[in-house]
Amino acid sequence: QALAAAHRRFTEGNPASLRQFEAQARYMPGANSRSVLFYAPFPLTIAKGEGATLWDADGHRYADFIAEYTAGVYGHSAPEIREAVAEAMNSGINLTGHNLLEGRLARLICERFAQIEQLRFTNSGTEANLMALTAALHFTGRRKIVVFTGGYHGGVLGFGAKPLPTTVPFDFLVLPYNDERTAREQIDRHGPEIAAVLLEPMQGASGCIPARLEFLQALRELATRVGALLIFDEVMTSRLAPHGLANKLGIRSDLTTLGKYIGGGMSFGAFGGRADVMALFDPRTGPLAHSGTFNNNVLTMAAGHAGLTKLFTPEAAGALAARGDAMRQRLNALCASEGVAMQFTGIGSLMNAHFVGGEVRSTDDLAPVDARLRQLLFFHLLSEGIYTSPRGFVVLSLPLTDADIDRYVAAIGSFIGEYRA
Ligand code: PLP
């Protein structure tokens, strides 16, 4: 009932977004190409962004607490990124050759994320994972890939509550996340067939569920023992510490995949790691080809370099993580003092609201009541001028102010007050 009322208010207040949705739905199923952006009754159309502020088609203004699902760490059209892209544009795009910008970004990434000795660029995190898995299959001569419940590795590689009916034709073994005992049992049992163990060191799409250190340590040890490659999907988590989350935890993966903000807010992905594995792709000596028209496009190469050197430096990454930790502590203290079964999980600048009281170690711990309350929260936050995601995901970006953060915390307080019953 409360949700129906929220939908009604939303529909009445957003006529321009509704018109846009209906017009677009004629040419695109669901009016868009990104399932994650849909919510009932219809999604807002965002007309404009500046810094950490968004305006929708009806002219409402929001503080942006989703930041392009982590790709937008710089805020909207930061001057440094804009200049870098303009400069690249002035020297010509679509150059059909090795160019002057790709090596610079590759070096910067390898120096920043120490476990990456060599890398290759892709256009998305999805492709990066597909290529890393392909590399592992060829390197080991094996067929099986271990992944985890709730894992998300891209549009064709999801293992969440709504698993994809046709995940790409790899031979997957799906194990429970954060369950060391099952991992030991199954990886030992299937050892000689396993090419790779792929996971996010904190599950992002499933609700910011951090891996336990002992779990990651066990996987490192098991992968080495059975001769499989350990692949960390750091598409989201590389922002959580100055040199990535794996580095902070002291665990060295064999391969790492990256994406999101590292391309300066442009389409981006990369996979890399051990030089002996990446040598598979050396056209002079290796057996594997890896192509992609836009893999080295100069706009992304320029934007990425500007972003990592001028804005999201290792120091800035550490500072943003600290701000996120402080905000999450405030939110959890508030939930505790109000005595509600609600909490914010996550690390640093990424967090997720959950309507459960106990520890969240995997998607199994998230109660079914979640979905409805999460939606109520989403619409409540919109009404308070805060743009997030219907799944309760909260993402900090550099231009968010302390006042924005105070506003978010206050909005959680008023939400608890309103829906406590
Ligand atoms: N891996 C993780 C952990 C992600 O969160 C995502 C995107 O949300 C991807 C991979 C896929 O990246 P992309 O959307 O760029 O294909």
Image (cartoon, rainbow, N blue to C red):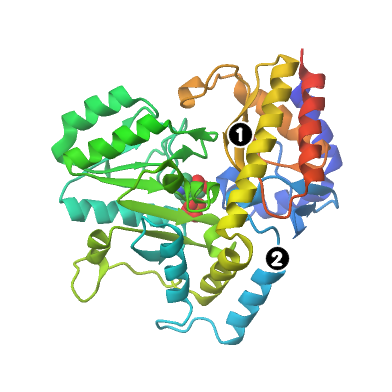
- Residue at the far bottom: name it: 91
> Which quarter of the picture shows residue 86?
bottom right
Does dot 2 land on a helix, a strand or a loop? loop
User: Sequence order check: which comes first, mark 2 or mark 1?
Assistant: 2
Residue visible at 62% across and 52% down?
Answer: 68
Q: Residues within 10 Å of mark 2 (few under 14, many from 20)?
A: some
Name the amino acid, label 2.
Ala
Residue visible at 25% across and 71% down?
Answer: 282
Q: Residues within 10 Å of mark 1 (few under 14, many from 20)?
A: many
Image position of 289 (left or right of 192): right
Disc 2 C-beta below 8 A from ligand 1: no
Residue visible at 18% across and 33% down?
Answer: 190
> Which quarter of the picture shows residue 82?
bottom right
Quadrant in which the C terminus appears? top right
Q: Which residue is mark 2?
A: 78
Image position of 320 (left or right of 177): right
Can you give x and y, in whole percent of width and height, for residue 263 in the image? 53, 64
Name the amino acid, label 1.
Asn
Q: Nearer the viewer, residue 158 or 393?
A: 393
Q: Which mark is residue 352?
A: 1
Can you give x and y, in whole percent of width and height, for residue 325 in the image? 63, 38
